[in-house]
Image (tube, helix red, strand yellow):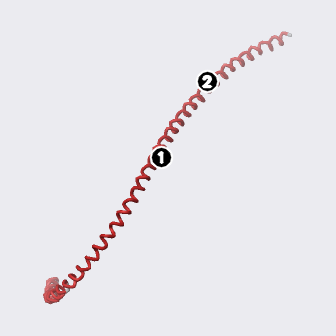
């Protein structure tokens, strides 16, 4: 049955041969290429559009204003100086290390625990009251 399918494709190939006769109509389209030569005379009007490119050169002077925008990139370098302020934030982290020194003051509070030991000696005075 599949071989019959191939025979159908051969019939379609015969149809392509009929389309091959349509290539003669493409020759008629080739005569239409003479009309493209008339369009080629329209290319002279494109030369007038080339004179319009001189106005694009005026737009090219507008690119000099883009160079002024390039000087605005120097202001971005000033923003880079603002990144140095982020280095100041790192200095603020050094102040957090000073807050870490405040933990040393808690160690001094730990010495206050020694005064509680003195209160513990006050319990010996309670023993003296016991002698009373």
**Total marks placed:** 2
Within-10-Å neighbours for mark 2: few <14, some 14–19, many 20+ = few
- Above or below 36: residue 99: above
The circle drawn on residue 96 is none
The vertical placement of 51 against 132, above or below, is: below
Name the residue nearer the viewer: 105 or 85. Answer: 85
Give the mark, 1 or 2, whose residue is nearer the N terminus. 1
Residue at numbered disc 2: 104
Residue 10 position (above or below residue 78): below
Q: Quadrant of the C terminus?
A: top right
Image quadrant occupied by the N terminus? bottom left
- Name the residue: 35% across, 63% down: 57
| Residue bearing the label numbered 1 | 75
Front position in the image: 15 or 79 = 79
3D distance between C-alphas at marks 1 and 2: 45 Å
Residue 30 location in percent, x, y? Answer: 17, 85
Observer able to see residue 25: yes
Q: Secondary structure at mark 1?
A: helix
Q: Write down the quadrant of residue 41 in the picture.
A: bottom left
**81 sits left or right of 113 in the view:** left
Q: Position of residue 3 (x, y in %)?
A: 14, 83
- At 39% from the left and 55% from the top, the residue drawn is 64
Whether residue 15 sits left or right of residue 69 in the image: it is: left
| Residue in the image at 34% along x and 70% along y | 52
Looking at the rendered image, the disc whose residue lies closer to the viewer, 1 or 2, is: 1
């Amino acid at each position: 049955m599949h071989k019959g399918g191939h025979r159908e494709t051969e019939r379609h190939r015969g149809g392509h041969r009929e389309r091959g006769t349509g290539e003669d109509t493409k020759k008629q389209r080739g005569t239409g290429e003479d009309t493209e030569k008339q369009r080629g005379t329209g290319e002279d009007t494109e030369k007038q559009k080339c004179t319009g490119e001189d106005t694009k050169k005026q737009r090219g002077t507008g690119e000099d204003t883009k160079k002024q925008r390039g000087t605005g990139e120097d202001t971005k370098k000033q923003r880079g100086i603002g990144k140095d302020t982020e280095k100041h934030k790192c200095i603020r982290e050094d102040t957090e290390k000073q807050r870490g020194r405040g933990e040393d003051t808690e160690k001094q509070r730990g010495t206050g625990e020694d005064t509680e030991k003195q209160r513990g000696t006050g319990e010996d005075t309670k023993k003296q009251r016991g002698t009373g």
